[in-house]
Image (tube, grey):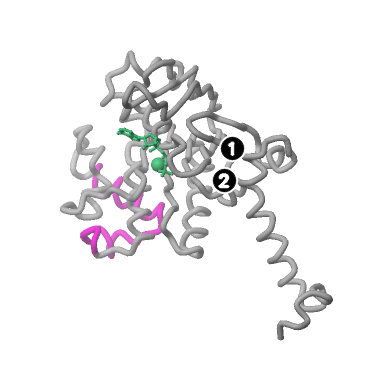
Amino acid sequence: MIRLDAISKTYDGVEYAVRDITLDVDAGEFIALLGASGCGKTTTLKMINRLIEPTAGTIHVDGIDVTQTDPVELRRGIGYVFQGIGLFPHLTVAENVAVVPRLLGWERSRTAARTDELLELVQLDPAQYRQRSPRELSGGQQQRVGLARALAARPKVMLMDEPFGALDPLTRDELQQAFADIRRRLDLTVVMVTHDMTEALLLTDRIAVMDAGRIVALDTPVDLMRDTTSEQVRRLLDMPRRQTGRLEAIMAGPDVRSGEGADRT
Ligand SMILES: Nc1ncnc2c1ncn2[C@@H]1O[C@H](COP(=O)(O)OP(=O)(O)OP(=O)(O)O)[C@@H](O)[C@H]1O
Ligand SMILES: [Mg+2]
């Protein structure tokens, strides 16, 4: 469905933000681009819908070379959730969600119906939230609106840049589950940028681990957990592993920890 072939990007002709990335995303697959800040995740994502032009390599979406497609046309078929929400502050919630339908010249009644349907999908009561301004919403609610906006034109492909970042853990979990559900129902092909290994492990089909502009590992969560060859991957997995271990110990009760921490009462 999405094919990146030997993609590179340099902004200044010297340093490479993305270096020789090859990646195939199947129809209906949910893939994570995971890695530290500055490793090239957003750059990679934005090249898929031509918000950024690659320096070298080719990208196909649904069999079509994206450089041969009108960018506006291309983006109609691809939902995009921006890093850091990116709602239009001067538009209401409903107007934000309806940005693409308006561009497409949908009739008013059809747009209104679609907007309400999408707000319900992301679990925001339309009657209550339709007319609000983004600044009258919590961060989590704003991210829901961003998600609804990206889904407006019924894309088959979704590109999401840290869509669940900056949320408290409960809201984050709730929105992740809501999206997992939406994605299955709509059979979306999804590329999601994240720096959260736990999120990638729990939600996605495959994880592309990036480091300094390259993909250094690409595997299913299960196989990635088993792989110990890559130092980079091991480091990323170390934290969720340790946290899981600690949580299990706490859940199991105090006797499991006997011998350690006895003097910490
Ligand atoms: N418009 C730009 N002009 C010049 N350099 C850029 C531009 N955008 C990004 N870069 C550089 O390219 C590299 C990759 O940036 P990118 O935004 O893709 O990282 P990222 O993995 O998304 O990071 P983060 O997790 O912090 O969002 C960085 O070194 C960044 O400084
Ligand atoms: Mg980024």
Residue 123 forms part of the magenta stretch: yes
Q: Quadrant of ligand 1?
A: top left
Q: Secondary structure at mark 2?
A: helix
Q: Residue furthest bottom?
A: 265
Q: Position of residue 30 (x, y in %)?
A: 54, 37
Q: Residue furthest left?
A: 90
- Amino acid under disc 1: Ile
Q: Position of residue 166 (x, y in %)?
A: 41, 57
Q: Closest to the observer: 54 or 75?
A: 54
Quick one: label 1 or label 2, which is nearer the N terminus? 2
Numbered circles on residues, count = 2
Any mark on residue 207, and which?
1
How many C-alpha atoms fall within 10 Å of the one at disc 2: few (<14), some, or many (≥20)?
many
Instruction: Specify whether 197 is left or right of 172.
Output: right
The boundaries of the magenta stretch are 110-135
Any mark on residue 200, and which?
2
Relative vertical location of residue 17 with respect to residue 234 in this rendering, above or below: above
Q: Is mark 1 within 8 Å of ligand 1?
A: no
